[in-house]
Amino acid sequence: MDSPRTTTPGGYYLPVKAALELALRNKPAANIAVVGLGAGMIACYASAQQSTTFFEIDPLVERIANRYFTFLSQCVGPKNVVLGDARLTLINAASQSFDVSILDAFSSDAIPIHLLTEAAFRLYREKLTADGLLLVHISNNYLDLAPVVAASGAQAGYSMLLFDDTQVTPAEASKRHWGSLWAAVLPSAYTREFEAHGWQPYTDRRVEWTDDHSSIFGVMKWKKLLGIICLH
């Protein structure tokens, strides 16, 4: 694999890279929060003066990221990993301490619902600067999470845009460009600039999730699920 020192990694994070370049172009010393460590690839999108703090619930993930990948060790900029549930550990962060927060914890079959509720989004907003940006990776084979993100974002006073990067050509795939779907949750005053760079307004239905009530049945991709069941 190419070294992240010489080749900027892509994967399904290319929309994140573009969004960070847009949101942080006038913030050379920005602070970035990432919920979900994975291999640590997002760390490579920060400059030498921009810090990245990962919030990761599983200590094994951190050990794997450090042992088998080089993103945390080779990419520039200060990096920190905070272990524990993000809803609990983020409380300890100072208000308005992050310029961008990235949620990347929803692509597997098991969804941490408590990270998508209205209360969770109010917490994210409290920790973001006034013009802060929240990026949410909502690619999922079986759940349509856009209505939930839109509803929780609206309760926190945000607008939501989508970037559909799911249609990847074979040539792009050969260069490690993977398809993905991302939501940008941000103050309405900044949506026009993102729209000019390909982000699309979300105008569809909303599904409210609270800490007291949430259900995945309202956001299931039933046609896909039923198709799988019929095949078996």
Image (cartoon, rainbow, N blue to C red):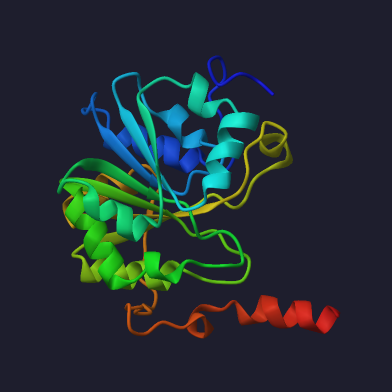
Quadrant holding the N terminus: top right
Q: In the image, 225: left or right of 76?
A: right
Q: Can you tell which quarter of the image residue 107 is in?
A: bottom right
Task: Answer above or below: position of 216 versus 52.
Answer: below
Q: Can you tell which quarter of the image residue 187 is in?
A: bottom left
Front residue of this view, candidates 50 and 13: 50
Q: Where is residue 163 in the image (x, y as percent from the top left)?
A: 45, 52
Residue at 77 percent across and 77 percent down: it is 228
Q: In the image, 231: left or right of 138?
A: right
Residue at 31 percent across and 29 percent down: it is 51
Q: Position of residue 136 (x, y in %)?
A: 41, 55
Q: In the image, 171: left or right of 219?
A: right
Q: Where is residue 53 in the image (x, y as percent from the top left)?
A: 35, 38
**Residue 11 in view in this figure:** yes
Residue at 21 percent across and 66 percent down: it is 156
Front residue of this view, candidates 67 and 138: 67
